[in-house]
């Protein structure tokens, strides 16, 4: 691999890491500012959990929210994440 290319990739990764860190810190600060621990589960899920999943690289096609599972337990998980091959995680 070309040494210049490797250095460019490392810089890109460092920039992405810094950007990710700032976005994550903002999300946490917003949570604290609105006193998220006093909010309802639904509010947290829509305001913060989904935003965190997006920040981590998940896309809305990769999750299922509050629907039944393949296994009939009668319970509904809050969020089901799917792998790239659509397997449930």
Image: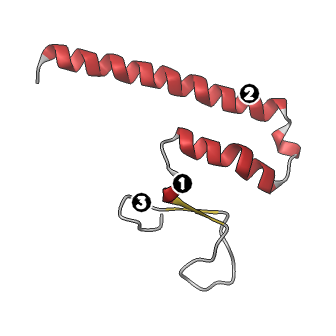
Please tell me the numbered disc located at residue 60. 1
Q: Residue at x 66, y 47 (%)?
A: 49
Cβ–Cβ under 8 Å for marks 3 and 1: no
Picture coordinates of residue 58, whole percent (x, y) = 49, 48
Picture coordinates of residue 25, whole percent (x, y) = 64, 26
- Left or right of residue 49: residue 59: left
Picture coordinates of residue 24, whole percent (x, y) = 61, 30
Quadrant of residue 67 within the rendered picture? bottom right
Circle 2: element type: helix
- The residue that mark 2 highlights is 29
Quadrant of residue 37 within the rendered picture? top right
**Which of the two marks, 1 or 2, is nearer to us in this view?**
1
**Which of the two marks, 3 or 1, is nearer to us in this view?**
1
Mark 2 surroundings within 10 Å by alpha-carbon count, few (fewer than 14), some (14 through 19), many (20 or more): few
Q: Residue at x 51, y 41 (%)?
A: 56
Q: CA distance from mark 1 to mark 2?
A: 24 Å
Mark 3 surroundings within 10 Å by alpha-carbon count, few (fewer than 14), some (14 through 19), many (20 or more): few
Report the residue that reaches farthest toward the front. Answer: 61
- The residue that mark 3 highlights is 83
User: Is 31 located above or below residue 88 in the figure?
Assistant: above
- Mark with earlier residue (3, 1): 1
Q: Quadrant of the N terminus?
A: top left
- Mark with earlier residue (1, 2): 2
Report the residue that reaches farthest toward the right. Answer: 38
- Left or right of residue 85: residue 68: right
């Amino acid at each position: 691999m070309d040494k210049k290319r490797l250095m460019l990739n490392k810089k890109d990764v460092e920039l992405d890491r810094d950007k990710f860190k700032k976005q994550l810190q903002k999300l946490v600060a917003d949570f604290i500012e609105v006193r998220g621990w006093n909010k309802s589960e639904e509010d947290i899920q829509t305001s913060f959990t989904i935003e965190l999943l997006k920040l981590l690289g998940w896309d809305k096609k990769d999750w299922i929210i509050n629907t039944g599972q393949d296994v009939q337990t009668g319970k509904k998980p809050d969020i089901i994440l799917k792998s790239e091959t659509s397997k449930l995680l």
